[in-house]
Image (spheres, rainbow, N blue to C red):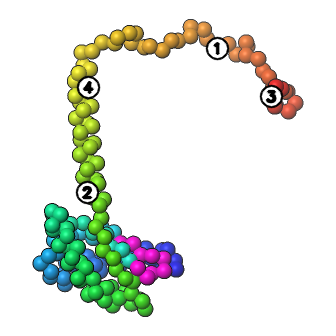
């Protein structure tokens, strides 16, 4: 099948699942869920729905159980609204991306704090040696002293 069609179907499934979780699924185990992404195989036989849950690990487990029990209702609604002959099977997967982003933000904040600490220590510091430790040649480059090793006819090196 066409990959563009699979992407369009994935977007539509994401909308349908989000609406179902918001309006029709009334499971008390269902936490504060956000559908982050949906991917459909190119043959349109399977769809993976990625979600995040705001809360603790226990709430994540309860939400996973609620999604698993509501999978049949959600799949039948996806089939009804998309009009496909064969409705793709749904798999719900917790999306670790927000957790990874939170951890990365923490690491960046820690690095920034360390940089500020080092900058404070370096404010009154002096160089141990010269301010510019790189040696500079006093001689200018003379183009006339440069030997041209190219053959005038072919432009290739004579070596």
The reply to whether residue 81 is visible in this rendering is no
Q: Looking at the rendered structure, which numbered label has been put on residue 119?
A: 4
Residue 88 spot, x, y in % from top left: 39, 83
Which residue sits at x=24%, y=69%? 34
Along the polypeptide, which appears first: circle 1 or circle 3?
Answer: 1
Q: Is residue 7 left or right of residue 116?
A: right
Crowding around mark 4 (Cα neighbors within 10 Å: few <14, some 14 to 19, many 20+) is few
Task: Return the residue at label 1.
Answer: 141
155 is higher (above) or lower (below) than 108:
above
Crowding around mark 1 (Cα neighbors within 10 Å: few <14, some 14 to 19, many 20+) is few
Task: Return the residue at label 2.
Answer: 99
Along the polypeptide, which appears first: circle 4 or circle 2?
Answer: 2
Which callout, 1 or 4, points to the residue nearer the camera?
4
Which residue sits at x=25%, y=26%? 118
Which residue sits at x=27%, y=58%? 98
Q: Do the CB atoms of the residues marked 4 and 2 lie less than 8 Å apart? A: no
Along the polypeptide, which appears first: circle 1 or circle 4?
Answer: 4
Q: CA distance from mark 3 to mark 2?
A: 59 Å
Q: Looking at the rendered structure, which numbered label has been put on residue 61?
A: none
Q: Looking at the rendered structure, which numbered label has been put on residue 157?
A: 3
Along the polypeptide, which appears first: circle 2 or circle 1?
Answer: 2
């Amino acid at each position: 099948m066409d990959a563009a069609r699979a992407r369009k179907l994935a977007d539509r499934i994401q909308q349908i699942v989000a609406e179902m979780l918001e309006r029709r699924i009334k499971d008390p185990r269902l936490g504060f869920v956000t559908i982050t992404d949906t991917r459909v195989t190119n043959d349109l036989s399977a769809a993976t729905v990625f979600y995040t849950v705001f809360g603790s690990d226990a709430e994540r487990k309860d939400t996973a159980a609620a999604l698993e029990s509501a999978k049949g209702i959600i799949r039948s609604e996806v089939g009804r609204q998309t009009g496909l002959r064969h409705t793709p099977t749904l798999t719900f997967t917790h999306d670790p991306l927000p957790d990874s982003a939170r951890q990365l933000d923490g690491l960046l904040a820690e690095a920034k704090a360390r940089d500020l600490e080092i900058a404070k220590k370096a404010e009154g510091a002096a160089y141990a040696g010269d301010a510019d430790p790189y040696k500079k040649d006093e001689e200018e480059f003379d183009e006339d002293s440069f030997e041209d090793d190219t053959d005038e006819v072919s432009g290739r090196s004579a070596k």
